[in-house]
Image (cartoon, rainbow, N blue to C red):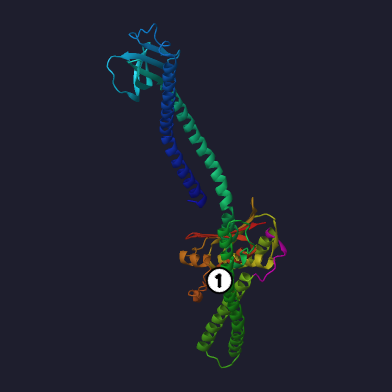
Amino acid sequence: MQLRSKMLLYNLLAKGLILLVFLMSGPFFLKYFAVKNTDTRLLEKRENVLQIIRNQGLDNFFVEEDYSRGFGSYNILKEEYILLERIAEPFLVDTIYNEERIIEEVSVTYRVCSYVFSFEEDYFLLEIGRSLETIKDIERIMFRILYITFFIFLLLTFFLDSAFGKWLVRPFKQIVENKLLHIKEPQQFQYSPIKTSTDEFRLLDESLSEMMKRIQKAFNQEREFISHASHELKTPLSILQSKVEGIFNLPDLKQEQMEKLMDMQSTVQKMKKMVNSLLLISKVNNAQFLKTDSVDLGELLSDLHQEWKSMADDKNIKMLLQKNELYQFTATNESLCIMMVQNALVNALKYTPDRGKISLSGEKTESGYQITVVDNGKGISKEMMDQIQNGTVFLKDASKDKSGFGLQLIYKIGLFLNVGVQIETNTNGTSLIFDFKN
């Protein structure tokens, strides 16, 4: 899961949990404070009624001091009532409680303030009630409001956190995409700093740049060693080859000696070929070629077909140019382009059996141009493909002329020229696909 998705999920769960706790506890707090406010109002009204009785007596409640019938008054909506009646035996009452009452065949829950007081040697029970239906209505309304607020808040939080998370990790994404994801060689690393105000991303960017400088330095030292070693090896190999050729001119050579000299000359030739391949790979890795040429890939494929068709005929191999469209590939190196496709063709000729077939094609695509070289040889082993794709230089099959330098050179040139190279191989043959993108 992406960091931005984890942050978004965490924010949603954390805020959702907090809101859920608030949503569940909110109505209880609301009810508690509403009841407390109702109790305060009831006590205030009780004091008002008692103040009226102290100032004006009971004339406002009883007619001609007839206390036997009591006094009761409900407002029109039955939300509040006052009850006053004389009691025979005095008892102490000063409490507030809930009570269900039937008013006109309708059950109503009241919050009742009950109080006993004395007036002119008589004792009276005073009850002041307030309906709780209003509180219940408010509670239901608040529940709806809280639920709607909960979902709206989560929705807004999702979009805002998503946008903020995307903006926050954008420098990290740029570091990964621009500096790591598409970097196949150290020299392709972009050292320009990523614009960010986050200290951690800035530190990551700087640390990656410093690490890549050390890696590139190590790679350059290795490549320089290979380049110098290849140059140094070329001289003794040339001397050795000239001496072998000189021995061939001796008049008293025996047949057995001649065969051994021919083996020596063949080995020297293979060694020279490997050294030249190493030197060329080193130069490609060190970007020692200019990319200022413009190559017509259709003409290149046609020229290679004509050049190698006669050799294919000599080996009883049918070489077909099935499709060939013209296409101008710019900002490249012509010699490396020719060498890359030619190596694919040479490998196909080398490993295609007698009466086999090689197909060449070049056609335009949506992204550029594609050259395909297909043979029906025995294919390339998985171990060798892994070594070639990983850039491993191996010499264990050099005696069989299968060192893998040709395919490795194809990969290196393709990387340098920004040409996609894809190899599809099985026991029925091998396909090399070059994807040229302008």
Residue 183 lies, in percent from the top left, at 58, 62
* Front-lying residue, 240 or 200: 200
Q: Which residue is mark 1?
A: 405
The percent position of residue 72, horizontal first and vertical second, equals 38, 12
Boundaries of the magenta span: 287-297
- Does residue 350 lie above or below 259 as drawn? above
Q: Residue 258 occupies which quadrant of the picture?
A: bottom right
- Residue at the location (62% across, 59% down)? 194
* The furthest residue to the left: 89
Q: Please name the residue shown 45% across and 30% down the image.
A: 143
Please say whether residue 293 is one of the residues in the magenta stretch.
yes
Quadrant in the picture for the C terminus: bottom right
Mark 1 secondary-structure assignment: helix
Residue 373 visible to an observer of this rendering:
no
Could you say which is closer to the camera, residue 98 or residue 321?
98
Residue at the image position 55 percent from the left and 71 percent from the top: 405
